[in-house]
Amino acid sequence: MKKILLICITVLLITGCSSKIVNGKVTCNQKDIVMEKENAILVDVRTKEEYEEGHLDNAINAPYDEVVSKLKDYDKDTPIVVYCRSGNRSAKAYQSLQDAGYTKLYDLGSISNCG
């Protein structure tokens, strides 16, 4: 009986921890789920030049310092996933969008998290 209980607790901990989104931070797998289930938009907040060198599939480009104005035509409850090269600019973009009233935000951080 103790073995079964231990196995159940272990399974719950593993599955519960792996899919939980904390403070808007998402993994690549979580990003894929959000994109599919919530029809989120994926936003590369790097420069136009960095974006043109390569980006994640289906991403649009809106540099972090222009992200609010570039996304102004989207409803404030549109799910948005942001990413950049290292995670610094995506964190700034996330905060800017949050300050502008967007409510369904996700931060993938670095593009390398998906590769």
Image (cartoon, grey):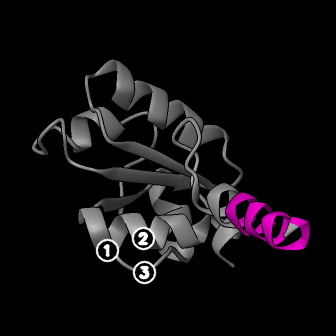
Residue drawn at (46%, 40%) of the image: 64
Residue under circle 1?
36
Residue found at the very far right of the displayed protein: 3
Can residue 59 be spotted in the picture? no
Mark 1 vs 3, N-terminal side: 1
Q: Which residue is mark 2?
A: 33
Locate the N terminus and report the quarter of the image it occupies.
bottom right
Q: Residue furthest top?
A: 99
Query: Where residue 3 is drawn, which disc sits there?
Result: none
Residue 109 falls within the magenta-colored stretch: no
Q: Is residue 32 left or right of residue 60?
A: right
Vertical position of residue 55 compared to residue 80: above or below = below
- Answer with the quarter of the image where residue 101 lies: top left
Q: Secondary structure at mark 2?
A: helix
State if disc 2 and disc 1 touch (CB < 8 Å): yes
Q: What's the residue at 42%, 70% (across, down)?
A: 33
Residue 10: which quarter of the image?
A: bottom right
Crowding near pointer 2: few (<14 within 10 Å), some, many (20+)?
some
